[in-house]
Amino acid sequence: MDRIPILKLGSALLVTIQVDMHDRLATALEEDLTNKIVQHNAHGVLIDISSLEIVDSFIGRMLDNIAAVSRVLDAETVVVGMRPAVAITLVELGLSLTGVKTALNVERGMALIDRKRESYVVDDDHVE
Amino acid sequence: MSSTMTMWNDIEATTLPIRRADDVVVVRQHVRAVAIKAGLSLVDQTKIVTAASELARNTLDYGGGGEVHVHRITDGGRQGVRLTFEDRGPGIPDINLALKDGYTTGSGLGLGLSGAKRLSNDFSIESTVGVGTRISIARWK
């Protein structure tokens, strides 16, 4: 079965969704990502959807699920590169993706994840 | 035809099967191509393709599979895309309830039907318990 590649980028994982996802592929991605977060001790997951021409409720639910599971594993999920037409349609569809952070591109998404890590480190120092 | 639909004529029509998850992808790609031909803007293309994706998945998950008729239509002046999804599944006992945001009998988000309605200019639904469901949507340029 096809798999979507997951790349390590610093302390984060980067997934670029380029294909028109069918349902089995989406489910496989959820499982693979969860395993890799633990395996690489990742602090963040960047999901680049700049190639996606639509996000329907199935993909929206997948993004929400990934974010929820990542959070439990102490990793932040940031969805990057959403096309403007996709954003407009998503809101009208009724999907608000409340559990998912978004950024305009990979660089800004990475900065979000790094900022969260830094604030953790500062908190740790403060406790000590 | 339901009175809520704008009067229209076919320019071209295709019927596609919805039997497997991969068919949903084919439906999306075909609807996109027809929407481009009809001259829909990028946002309107995205809306009708997203609505098609939701309804195709409903046809598969709740209707046990079926088919979609994809029409490029005109009302004399402008063009549009009209989609009719048909299944011979269990039918929907309470259509008003099924159209409520967040209502689902499955594992989804319950946004498919209500979302597809919001994303369309015209929407009609006929369903008979034990016979099946037919849903038509249209998006105009």
Image (tube, coloured by chain):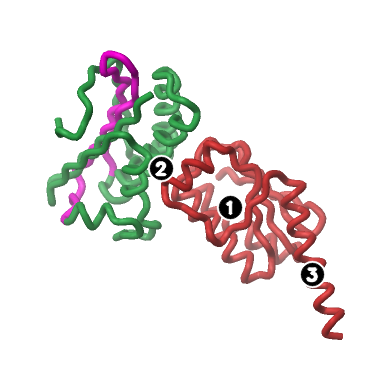
Chain colours: A red, B green
- Is A59 situated left or right of B103 in this image? right
- Look at the numbered disc 2 and give the secondary structure of its residue: helix
Question: Mark 3 or 1, which is nearer the eye?
Answer: 3
Q: Are labels 3 and 2 on one chain?
A: no
Left or right? Give the position of B41 relative to B98. right
**The N terminus of chain B lies in which quarter of the figure?**
top left
Between marks 1 and 2, how big is the CA–CA gap? 16 Å
Which residue, given by chain and number where applicable, does mark 1 sit on?
Answer: A29
- Relative to residue B87, is residue A60 depicted above or below? below
Q: Quadrant of residue B38?
A: top left
| Magenta-colored stretch includes residue B70 | yes
Magenta span: predominant SS is strand
Secondary structure beneath disc 1?
helix
Element assignment for label 3:
helix
Q: Please report, as a chain letter, where disc 2 is located.
A: B
Q: Which mark is residue B21?
A: 2
The residue segment tinted magenta is B65-93
The residue depicted at 38 percent of the width and 24 percent of the height is B141
Q: Chain of mark 3?
A: A
Q: Residue at x 22, y 41 (%)?
A: B87
Circle 3 residues within 10 Å: few <14, some 14–19, many ≥20: few
* Residue that badge 3 annotates: A119
Disc 3 and disc 2: Cα gap in Å?
43 Å
Give the vertical position of B41 relative to B12 (above or below): below
